[in-house]
Image (cartoon, rainbow, N blue to C red):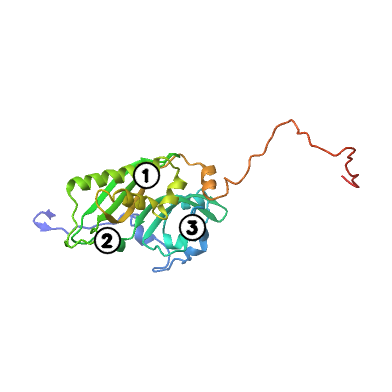
Amino acid sequence: RRVHGAFQPRIYTMAQGKNKRLTKGGKKGAKKKIIDPFTKKDWYDVKAPSMFNIRQIGKTLVTRTQGTKIASDGLKGRVFEVSLADLQNDEITFRKFKLMAEDVQGRNVLTNFHGMDLTRDKLCSMVKKWQTLIEAHVDVKTTDGYLLRMFAIGFTKKKPYQVKKTCYAQHAQVKLIRKKMVDIITREVSSNDMKEVVNKLIPDSIGKDIEKACQGIYPLHDVFIRKVKVLRKPKFDIGKLMEMHGDGGTSKTVSTTEKGEKIERADGFEPPVQDSV
């Protein structure tokens, strides 16, 4: 600042108590106490529905209940992808099932069917040259209210004693085969509940039915239900889930009527005298 022809230097004063970083106490570089996060977690057993031979599919980890954060809420909604070979103890390794955790009972997580898929290597091994690939998909509802989107895949094959290199189907034949696929999937799924549908998906009996039905149009091979998506589920019912896990359906209803039943006794029968009541 110019004052009467001379330069006057500016003096700055710092406001007291404003610079928070200088007044902060504590040793610089003091380390926070490290706690292993796994000490706060519990292991839960994941159980598959009763449609599969092997019910114990693995274990899952969740943080223990603390305050308003409940452990079971952290488990519900988890999706487990399991190979059919691990669920059925068989050789079919290319089919994968998705199971969703729906309820927690004790240390057991009860799962329900959530989808099905084929492995990528299986799909890639089926796609070849000199043949026609035919795909179809359809949205269909089961009797117990599940809305499923099902995808089918199939390939044309050479006729017996065929010399020609290629086996391409005409467009009209492809349309007919696609219509047959949609009709068979709709018929098989819409008349059954979810449990029955899963029982059909395990050996893929629907794919075999499509192959058989299309022989008159054009011979097919490698016909599979490629993928199943669960689009919509009915309202959660613990009774239905327990039935799927083989615990609810077995219990018989107990009669609670007031009236007793007449029991046939031999003539002159008297009950034995009891020592104590």
In the image, residue 215 lies at what x, y percent? 28, 51
SS category of the residue bearing label 3? strand
SS category of the residue bearing label 1? strand
Dot label at residue 72: none
Q: Residue under label 1, please give it.
A: 148
Which mark's residue is nearer the viewer, 2 or 1?
Answer: 2
Query: Quadrant of the rendered structure where residue 130 is?
Result: bottom left
Q: Residue under label 2, please give it.
A: 126
Left or right: 275 as drawn, with respect to 1: right
Taking 7 as reference, is 67 above or below it? Answer: above
Taking 131 as reference, is 147 above or below it? Answer: above
* Residue at the spot 54% in from the left edge and 46% down from the top edge: 243
Q: Residues within 10 Å of mark 2 (few under 14, many from 20)?
A: some
In the image, residue 45 lies at what x, y percent? 52, 59
Which mark's residue is nearer the viewer, 3 or 1?
Answer: 1
Q: Quadrant of the C terminus?
A: top right
* Residue at the spot 35% in from the left edge and 45% down from the top edge: 185
Q: Nearer the viewer, residue 6 or 267?
A: 267
Q: Nearer the viewer, residue 147 or 166?
A: 166
Q: What whole-number distance in Å separates the C-alpha atoms at marks 2 and 1? A: 25 Å
